[in-house]
Image (cartoon, rainbow, N blue to C red):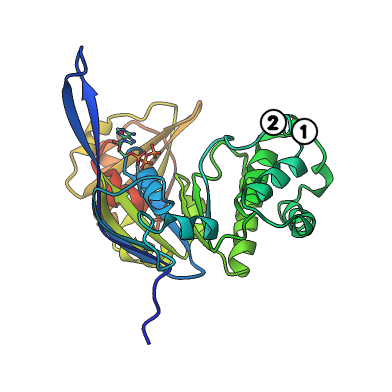
Amino acid sequence: MKIQPIIDVVDVKRTYKTTTGLWKSATKEIEALSGISFNVQEGEIFGLLGPNGAGKTTMIKIMTTMLIPTSGKVSILGLNPVTEYAQLRPQINFILGGERNLYWRLTAYQNLAYFADLYQIPRQQQKKRIADLLDLVELTDAAHQKVETFSKGMKQRLQIARGLINEPKILFLDEPSIGLDPYSARKLRDILRQLKETGTTILLTTHYMYEADELCDRIAFIDKGKLVSIDSPNNLKASSNHLSIIECKLAGPDPLNLDALHKLSFIEHIQVERQDYFSLLRIHTLSPQAAVSSIFESLQGAEVLDLAITKPTLEDVYLQVIGGGKNA
Ligand SMILES: Nc1ncnc2c1ncn2[C@@H]1O[C@H](COP(=O)(O)OP(=O)(O)OP(=O)(O)O)[C@@H](O)[C@H]1O
């Protein structure tokens, strides 16, 4: 028996019409999604990754009943978000980036009680559910503190609790860890993993490749409204195994003669990180042996402090399939 995906997106397009010109007389169309198809299985953590403007938020808004697609088919929990939104909404929830949606003058507990009322959760169930959620996001001690006194990480954890108040089968998160320090971001990942263990399906967007690699069962790279690649992080990295990264640390903040390197045909892409006392080049190549000697030649005069050949990270794969170009 074929298992129905919990999210099924088939050839979805979405065009925005905007008006421009002095009198707003000219209309302009922007194709945010140009025919996207993918599906998500129950219990998966699924990542949508792509550059700014790729169409990720548009896709999330369509799946969460906030936006109607121009064409294509979407099925969430077997329901059509356009025509069956009333049945779908109580079964899903979403957290968009930033701190909207919380009432800063209320305490954490009062915020959750307010949203519990909105979802018509019976009062006799609310107390336990709110206590459990505060425990999950480690805010029990701050339950009766006003949200305006919370750190960004605490607010974001409270957002997660808010997003779980109706025990959603699917939780959608748009850039959940934006602006969080590494410790808070890790805490958030732990919470999402715990949620997965309870059977919640999670769809998230993120710009943090490390987060996607650590957390997601599968990832879809999207660019300019199109799906570029979809697979598990390990398979995505393995598919780029023919690629090598030469990490070259040079003394001084300004690496010499990068033009010569850019001209080498077997170099795919060069990333440069400039620090006060050194610069780090990450050179993507398919032929590391050939590249190493040419790199030394091209960098004549530069003091090479360190050189290593490594395998691609998820970020390298992303740059290869989306970043493109030699100068990014
Ligand atoms: N309400 C709107 N009206 C007109 N154009 C829009 C609207 N919302 C989004 N767009 C455009 O649609 C495209 C996709 O935007 P979207 O916000 O979905 O991308 P994104 O991948 O979420 O980007 P980011 O990573 O920056 O959040 C962009 O070109 C954007 O400018």
The one nearer the camera, 292 or 174, is: 174
- Give the SS element for disc 2: loop
Residue at the location (22% across, 35% down)? 260
Q: Amino acid at mark 2?
A: Trp
The yes-or-no answer for disc 1 within 8 Å of ligand 1 is no
Q: Tell me if label 1 and label 2 are in contact, CB under 8 Å.
A: yes
The image position of residue 166, as x and y in percent, is 62, 57
Task: Look at the picture and state if 1 lies above or below 21.
Answer: below
Task: Look at the picture and state if 181 lies above or below 244.
Answer: above
Separation of residues labelled 1 and 2 (CA atoms): 6 Å
Residue at the location (20% across, 13% down)? 23
Q: Which residue is mark 1?
A: 146
Q: Earlier in the sequence, mark 1 or mark 2?
A: 2
The count of marks equals: 2
Quadrant occupied by the N terminus: bottom left
> Residue 104 got which mark?
2
The image position of residue 326, as x and y in percent, is 24, 40
Q: Is 141 left or right of 12, judged from the image as shown?
A: right
The image position of residue 37, as x and y in percent, is 28, 60
Q: Is 245 left or right of 213, judged from the image as shown?
A: left
Quadrant occupied by the C terminus: top left
